[in-house]
Amino acid sequence: MISKENEREVKILAIESSCDETAAAVVVNGRDMRSNVISSQIALHTLYGGVVPEIASRKHIEKINQVIEQALSDAAVTLDEIDAIGVTYGPGLVGALLVGVAEAKAISYAKNIPLVGVHHIEGHISANYIENPKLKPPFLCLVVSGGHTHLVKVVDYGCYEILGRTRDDAAGEAFDKVARAIGLGYPGGPKIEKVSHEGNPNAILFPRAKIADGEYDFSFSGLKSAVLNYLNGCRMKDIPINQADVAASFQQSVTDVLVEHARHAIREYKMQQFAIAGGVASNGVIRAAMEQMCMEEGVRFFHPSPILCTDNAAMIGAAAYYDFIAGKRAGLDLNAVPNLKLGE
Ligand code: KG4
Ligand code: ZN
């Protein structure tokens, strides 16, 4: 249902704090990004080799007001001009989510602005709307992030059919764990991509997992174990480890699995449009392979720029707009739901 609100400018203030980025943005009509402020905690968590939930929550509290003020000021709007507040309420780290949710509820109550709760994955998918004005459902979307690997049929705005998901590690999690194992540190994805440019993707044949009873499901824990076994084997036999070759070969294995799953779904569901989303979608090798596959299949390919692939609030503003015009509203009893399922 599209109401009259669709005919005028709807300005959404969006807030995202589900993991280690404190972010706020102003998005008009779901597509026009007027500001996008991200305060990243990556440097802080790098000291510990991964995200420390308690530290993340505390840092969100310190930064949240600042990023919201900056987002409003960059967009040259005041709270009085905001039509709705969109906030991520799950999935994610509960303490981190609560900071954004509490802030959004406080502003909604104080300024009497409608509140919209947004699913984080729906946000990642919606990042594609911002830079691709022509993209409209239906389309197939592969969401690959640190916490999720989902192959989703976007049937309509806010309407999703999950075709496949990971059975164990998410794709980004595999990048992070393998990066740690080869001594690259956190966050693994960008570091593996960088060193892989110096390596040979065919140097080591790592497995490409297939799930017998779920043709669109993924599994990355076997690949991670294969990399660890390879490293142990080299160490035991005193064979020097070529970090770049391991990184490039691992990345190629992930890429091949993602591309083949997507190709299969495009054919079976006769999709005309394919999009990628999430932090891992900023990987240039994966992106190029997807583009090539879409060209071969005669399908239009969409992807957000890297800054809109990793966590940000503009994507939450895009998703919130379509929920808002469909009449969805959250009450002041909105709570953080760390295991929120897509479509709930
Ligand atoms: O979407 P995101 O910012 O947060 C979650 O919702 O999880 O994704 C973060 C994940 C991390 O695992 C990170 O290593 C991965 O995305 N990532 C990448 C790249 N940039 C970030 N993985 C592969 N290649 C990259 N260039
Ligand atoms: Zn994310």
Image (cartoon, rainbow, N blue to C red):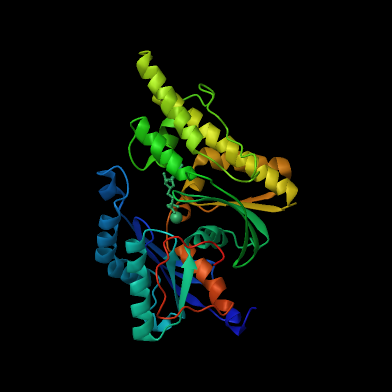
Disc count in the image? Answer: 0
Give residue 152's position: percent from left, percent from top.
61, 55
Query: What quarter of the picture does the C terminus occupy?
Result: bottom right
Q: Residue placed at 69% from the left, 47% from the top?
A: 265
Q: Between residue 324 and residue 314, name the one nearer to us.
A: 324
- Is residue 29 shown to the viewer in this render? no
| Position above or below: 81 against 121 | below
- Is residue 313 shown to the viewer in this render? yes
Left or right: residue 162 versus residue 55 is right
Give residue 273's position: percent from left, percent from top.
68, 53
Give residue 259's position: percent from left, percent from top.
61, 40
Locate residue 105: give its quadrant.
Answer: bottom left
Q: Residue placed at 66% from the left, 57% from the top?
A: 139
Left or right: residue 201 versus residue 335 is right
Left or right: residue 87 versus residue 319 is left
| Position above or below: 74 against 78 | above
Give residue 288's position: percent from left, percent from top.
57, 40
Query: What quarter of the picture does the N terminus occupy?
Result: bottom right
Locate residue 327: give its quadrant.
Answer: bottom right
Q: Between residue 263 and residue 27, name the one nearer to us.
A: 263
